[in-house]
Image (cartoon, rainbow, N blue to C red):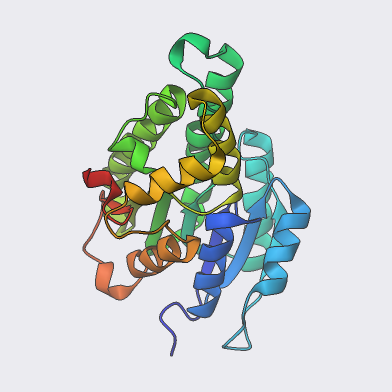
């Protein structure tokens, strides 16, 4: 029997990048996966990639705007109707923009906090009644929550909030046997990073390739993080071996958080 066979997982921001890798990991471990994303086409593409090793899994794409309370509640009502309950909740939806504090707009600040923090709050709150006893919640945080970046003050602040939310919810949900942890990825090869290296290059007067080389240089293990590296750690956090871990932040950064 596979580790998560018979379970139901809900993954936000799963239309690509880290979320897609986590959805694939959950499916490979035997769970039925609801692939949620604002980009429905991306969600559908992810579902097309999901394995079905138990032959009884039912994967589904779902368009969800995590910043909309009504939209999130509608999504959870759909999950209840089609799956009955949830075992695994992966709050992965996230965004970034890049500016020094003096150049930040209020709109950028709100955008980062609305998706990265408010969205996580709304999804967790709506999913709570559906989570079975002993369920697992994993939140995508960031190395920025342990190693602040001066080009990302708003994003950094939002990820500190994710870290605090993770710990507070871990205490609240402990009586139901639900563990709540987060992962803090480092320099991950995603579309988000592809945008960020251009922005950072423009801010620093260097090329995107030089920005990437700097990321690798600052990572003791000598390479960028792959989305699958993060997914592997999440797979552990929803495994029986992690049943006594809660309120933890696991760095998946190849040591970049240390230097």
> Count of labels shown?
0
Residue 96 makes an appearance in the image: yes
Observer-nearest of 115 and 96 = 96
The quadrant holding residue 34 is bottom right
Q: Position of residue 248 (x, y in %)?
A: 25, 50
Whether residue 53 is situated above or below residue 22 in the rendered picture: below
Q: Is residue 8 above or below residue 144?
A: below
Residue at 50% over, 36% down? 116
Q: Which residue is at the front of the view, 189 or 84?
A: 189
Residue extending furthest toward the right: 41
Tell me the quarter of the picture where residue 177 sits.
bottom left
Query: Residue 28: x and y, percent?
Result: 52, 79
Residue at the (38%, 24%) spot, across then down: 150
The structure residue drawn at horizontal position 33% and vertical position 36%, both measured from the top left corner, is 145
Looking at the picture, how far across and down is residue 68, in whole percent? 65, 34
**Can you say which quadrant of the picture contains the C terminus?**
top left
Whether residue 183 is visible to the viewer of this picture, yes or no, is no
Residue 136 appears left or right of 19: left
x 62%, y 67%: residue:
83
Q: Quick one: 137 or 249, which is closer to the camera?
A: 249
Viewed as shown, does residue 152 lie left or right of 167?
right
Instruction: Work out which quarter of the rendered image holds the N terminus and state it.
Output: bottom left
Whether 109 is drawn above or below 228: the answer is above
Rendering coords of residue 90 (x, y %) = 48, 55
Instruction: State the residue lying farthest toward the top.
Output: 102
């Amino acid at each position: 029997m596979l580790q998560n066979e018979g379970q139901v997982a809900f993954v936000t921001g799963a239309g690509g990048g880290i979320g897609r890798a986590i959805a694939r990991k959950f499916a490979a471990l035997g769970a039925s996966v609801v692939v949620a994303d604002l980009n429905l086409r991306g969600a559908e593409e992810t579902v097309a990639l999901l394995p079905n090793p138990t032959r009884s899994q039912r994967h589904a794409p779902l368009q969800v705007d995590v910043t909309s309370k009504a939209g999130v509640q509608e999504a959870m009502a759909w999950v209840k109707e089609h799956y009955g309950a949830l075992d695994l909740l992966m709050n992965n939806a996230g965004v970034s923009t890049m500016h020094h504090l003096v150049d930040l707009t209020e709109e950028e600040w709100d955008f980062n906090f609305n998706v990265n923090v408010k969205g996580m709050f709304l999804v967790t709150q709506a999913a709570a009644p559906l989570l079975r006893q002993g369920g697992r919640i994993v939140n995508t945080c960031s190395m920025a929550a342990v190693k602040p970046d001066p080009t990302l003050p708003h994003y950094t602040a939002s990820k500190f909030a994710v870290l605090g939310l993770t710990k507070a919810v871990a205490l609240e949900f402990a009586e139901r046997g639900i563990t709540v942890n987060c992962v803090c990825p480092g320099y991950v090869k995603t579309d988000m990073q592809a945008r960020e290296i251009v922005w950072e290059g423009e801010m620093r007067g260097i090329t995107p390739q030089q920005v990437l080389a700097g990321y690798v240089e600052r990572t003791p293990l000598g390479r960028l993080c792959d989305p699958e590296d993060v997914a592997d750690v999440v797979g552990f956090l929803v495994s029986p071996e992690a049943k006594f871990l809660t309120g933890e932040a696991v760095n998946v950064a190849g040591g970049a958080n240390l230097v």
